[in-house]
Image: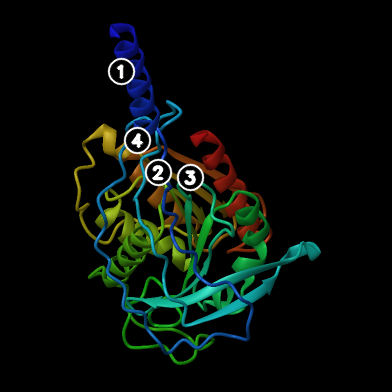
Amino acid sequence: MNRRLLLLAALFSLFTLAFACSDAPKDEPVDASTDASTDASTDVSTDVSTDDPPDASEEDGDAGVPLLPSSGGSGGLTCTSTGSANLQNGAGTIDYCVTTISGSELKIYVPDPIPDRPLTLALFVHGDGATTHTNNTSLRFHGAWVKQHDVLYVSARAPNGCSWWRPPLPVIEDCNASLTGGADVEGKNADVLRDIVAAVRAAWDIDDRRILFGGASGGSIQLTGSYLPRHGDTHPGFYALMCGGEVPWQAMDWDVSDPALRATTALSFVYGDEDYLFDDIQDCRDHYDALGFPVTEQIIEGAEHCKGYSQLDKVIELWDGALASDD
């Protein structure tokens, strides 16, 4: 009789252990719609909370592999419309979602299906005129790479419609006209970029090891002159800076004396030796180098401002190297 009781107890213990160790299904974030359509309307804004959710746990996963530090976001963003762009060299198409955050029209590519891991965020900030955004040029040049690497890609248009380094208001009606007015010294567009990053991190599970930033001309000026000094400590970032750069218009808003904070931000400049912004870019490079940031550069012989090389291809070249260093 005692042997039967012992056997029943052992069987009950094995059943309880097997039930306790079974994996519960995990929720995946909702993907934004990527159905192709005609050009998107830019009038409608999406009301999106920009409060960051608590960071995901960094404890080991079920297989004993450490989880990546990530935003833990989910739910996606609501598209006001969708669109499709042809990739370079006949490499197919890329579908995107259109929405608006803090006055900036975004064109967002979300991998489909979403991989079972946090997504790298790549944010591209156009130069004056905004043609790489409005004509889908950045999507066409960057699309094959972001699709290959399952990168969540955002092309962001300046709130004034044309220029990231000028104030968000008034709206500039003609991007081809001679633009006048001073820089956005109050940092309002830097705050817009901050809101965009926060909204995307809340909407998808974003890999927090490093955000990939890319800029050209006025976009590079905005990133170095305003966004980085105001919000550069918020998230680690790699900055691919084409044909532009500016010494910050203000004192740094965060403790750049902390080497641990500086080490998470790297800047890489590409520009021509005949660029009319040559001196400004070098002053910017020297400024961040003197502060102790990791800084690299590539000077293109005989190249003028944003000419003589493919800015958009260079962004991918630098992003690819940064992404490889994270693996």
User: Are dots 3 and 2 in contact, CB under 8 Å?
Assistant: no
> Which mark is in front, 2 or 4?
2
Q: Amino acid at mark 2?
A: Ala
Dot 4: few (<14), some (14–19), or many (≥20) neighbours within 10 Å?
A: some
Residue 9, disc: 1
| Circle 2 Cα neighbour tier, 10 Å, few/some/many (<14 / 14–19 / ≥20) | few
Q: Position of residue 280 (x, y in %)?
A: 42, 57
Query: Which quarter of the image is occupied by the N terminus?
Result: top left
Secondary element type, mark 3: loop
Q: Earlier in the sequence, mark 3 or mark 2?
A: 2
**Of tags 2 and 1, which is closer to the observer?**
1
> Is residue 85 found left or right of 42 in the rendered image?
right
The first of marks 4 and 1 along the sequence is: 1
Q: Which mark is residue 117?
A: 3
Amino acid beneath label 4: Ala
Distance from the alpha carbon under mark 2 to that under mark 4: 38 Å
**Whole-percent x and y of residue 116?**
51, 46
Give the structural element (helix, strand or loop) at label 4. Answer: helix
Which residue type carries mark 3? Arg
Q: In terms of depth relative to the viewer, which is nearer, 82 or 129?
A: 82
Dots 4, 1 in contact, CB < 8 A: no
Q: What secondary structure is marked by label 1?
A: helix
Q: CA distance from mark 2 to mark 1?
A: 26 Å
Going by the image, does 215 lie left or right of 314?
A: left
Q: Which residue is mark 2?
A: 24
Q: Position of residue 178 (x, y in %)?
A: 48, 86
Which residue is the site of mark 4?
263
